[in-house]
Image (spheres, grey):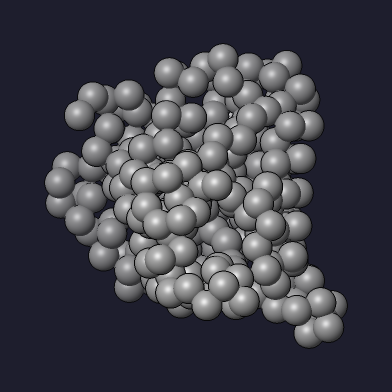
């Protein structure tokens, strides 16, 4: 594997599990120095740091709940204090939500938008305080932002807002030669998917998940986290230097 991220310092929010952990490992394999943000999975984050440093990499784990902008600021500051600068932000922290319109509460809205939308916006705000020309920012949307899924309104709205943020922040950050894009993953084989994937097929279809995937995903399966991580690595690299304000769907051909 090449060393596209040699001498690059990268913060990954939600970096201890799921897609975030896969992104962390992919970027480390390409030479990145990592600050891994986590909310509650301290053992997983510390185990990941141990494995990366044992392999000759540089990494730290920093506890930060993305719903709190002050903790996001602390995460970015700790990365710079440890490694001297910040080149890339990859925002992977997120939560799922399924529920009917009548079941939704203001608390649900605040929690889902607090993590999925506000958390990503303020992660960008705090990251760019430290970024130099050539910085890269990759946020996380979802295929649900552009494809209707039954009882998924709140989650989908929180991710659609991320795509709007990316589109509009591109012009502002472009003046500093900082790019900002997003990945919209489809179904991915993570612990979150194990918990929620069965909710994606419309209940009236009466289809098990495997049958639904064969009829709605061109590749007929969930993605592996490593496959999605490769898309993040592309947008975070110099190979994507003329891409900004865009959302890349990594969904296996969802139709």
Is 16 above or below relative to 34? Answer: below
Q: Would residue 9 appear left or right of 255 to someone viewing this image?
A: left
Most foreground residue, 203 or 149: 203
| Residue found at x 76% / y 40% | 164
Q: Would residue 157 appear left or right of 236 to someone viewing this image?
A: right
Q: Position of residue 171 (x, y in %)?
A: 76, 22
Most foreground residue, 193 or 119: 193
Q: Position of residue 4 (x, y in %)?
A: 32, 24
Is 167 above or below relative to 116? Answer: above
| Residue found at x 69% / y 57% | 148
> The N terminus is located in which quarter?
top left
| Residue found at x 78% / y 84% | 103
Q: Position of residue 224 (x, y in %)?
A: 32, 53
Residue 135, quarter of the rendered image: top right
Q: Would residue 15 appear left or right of 89 to someone viewing this image?
A: left
Q: Would residue 81 appear left or right of 50 to someone viewing this image?
A: right
Most foreground residue, 27 or 207: 207
Residue 140 in sight in this render: no
| Residue found at x 36% / y 38% | 230
| Outermost residue toward the bottom in this view | 103
Residue 216 in sight in this render: yes
Most foreground residue, 137 or 127: 137
Residue 93, quarter of the rendered image: bottom right
Q: Position of residue 2 (x, y in %)?
A: 23, 24
The total of numbered circles placed on residues is 0
């Amino acid at each position: 594997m090449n060393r596209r991220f040699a001498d690059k310092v990268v913060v990954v929010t939600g970096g201890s599990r799921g897609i975030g952990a896969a992104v962390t490992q992919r970027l480390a394999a390409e030479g990145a120095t990592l600050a891994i943000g986590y909310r509650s999975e301290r053992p997983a984050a510390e185990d990941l740091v141990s494995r990366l440093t044992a392999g000759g990499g540089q990494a730290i784990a920093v506890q930060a709940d993305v719903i709190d902008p002050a903790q996001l600021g602390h995460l970015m500051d700790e990365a710079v204090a440890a490694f001297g600068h910040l080149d890339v932000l990859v925002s992977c922290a997120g939560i799922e939500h399924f529920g009917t319109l009548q079941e939704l509460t203001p608390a649900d809205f605040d929690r889902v938008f607090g993590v999925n939308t506000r958390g990503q916006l303020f992660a960008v705000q705090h990251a760019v305080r430290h970024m130099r020309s050539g910085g890269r920012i990759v946020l996380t949307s979802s295929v649900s932002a552009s494809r209707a899924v039954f009882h998924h309104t709140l989650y989908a709205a929180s991710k659609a807002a991320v795509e709007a943020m990316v589109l509009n922040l591109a012009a502002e950050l472009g003046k500093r030669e900082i790019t900002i894009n997003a990945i919209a993953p489809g179904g991915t084989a993570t612990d979150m998917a194990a918990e929620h994937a069965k909710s994606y097929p419309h209940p009236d279809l009466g289809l098990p998940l495997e049958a639904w995937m064969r009829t709605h995903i061109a590749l007929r399966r969930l993605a592996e986290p490593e496959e999605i991580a490769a898309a993040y690595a592309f947008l975070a690299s110099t190979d994507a230097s003329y891409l900004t304000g865009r959302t890349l769907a990594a969904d296996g051909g969802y139709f």
